[in-house]
Amino acid sequence: MRESCRSAAPRAREFPAGETWEALLAGRLDGCPLTRLVVTHFHPDHAGAAGWLAANYGLRVFMRQTEYLSSVNIHLDPGALQADHYQRFYSGRGLDAATTEKVVTQGHGYLKMVTGLPPTFRRLISGEQLQIGGIWPQPNGQGGQVTGLISHFRLPKP
């Protein structure tokens, strides 16, 4: 596998993610097979094109169960994010009332720009190792962006 096949990743663009991926696969990633999709967590900059990629390229999504279910829940009922406990959460951390209102009502507009996840996924379990090129990423024990990222480090083959 070419080195660029392992190291290329789409960056934020002003056009839809599907167009970005199509351009990458026709350009820098030409000849690099897509075999599976590892999603680190549910934020849209990580999971936003997962459904599109899975559907268009027949990929299986690998993801921690908590992150998968969080994403599915948000897509099923984005209005739930306006619940009182979310408003208390944001205002309790110093956001003023106007900013809190924007976050809980307008902060989820990204859902119109991303695809949901496919109806099935392959659950990643803490301590499990996947081979991706010469790298063996390992999911750690917690969910979320900071504490639950899939840790990337090189390990000898098991």
Image (cartoon, grey):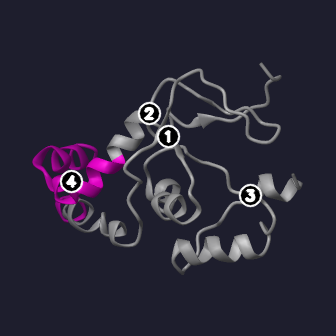
Marks 1 and 3, Cα distance to the nearest angstrom? Answer: 20 Å
The residue that mark 2 highlights is 143
Query: Magenta span covers which residues?
Result: 71-100
Asked if the residue under mark 4 is in contact with the one under mark 2, i.e. CB atoms within 8 Å, the reply is: no
Query: What whole-number distance in Å separates the C-alpha atoms at marks 1 and 2?
Result: 10 Å
Q: Secondary structure at mark 1?
A: strand
Q: Which residue is mark 4?
A: 81
**Amino acid marked by disc 1:** Met
Q: Nearer the viewer, mark 1 or mark 2?
A: 1
Q: Amino acid at mark 4?
A: Leu
Q: Which x, y percent locates residue 20?
A: 62, 74
The first of marks 2 and 3 along the sequence is: 3
The amino acid type of the residue labelled 3 equals Pro
User: For mark 1, does the 10 Å Cα neighbourhood hold few (<14), some (14 to 19), or many (20 or more) residues?
Assistant: many
Marks 3/4: CA distance? 37 Å
Cβ–Cβ under 8 Å for marks 1 and 3: no
- Say which residue appears at 27% left-offset and 48% top-offset: 73
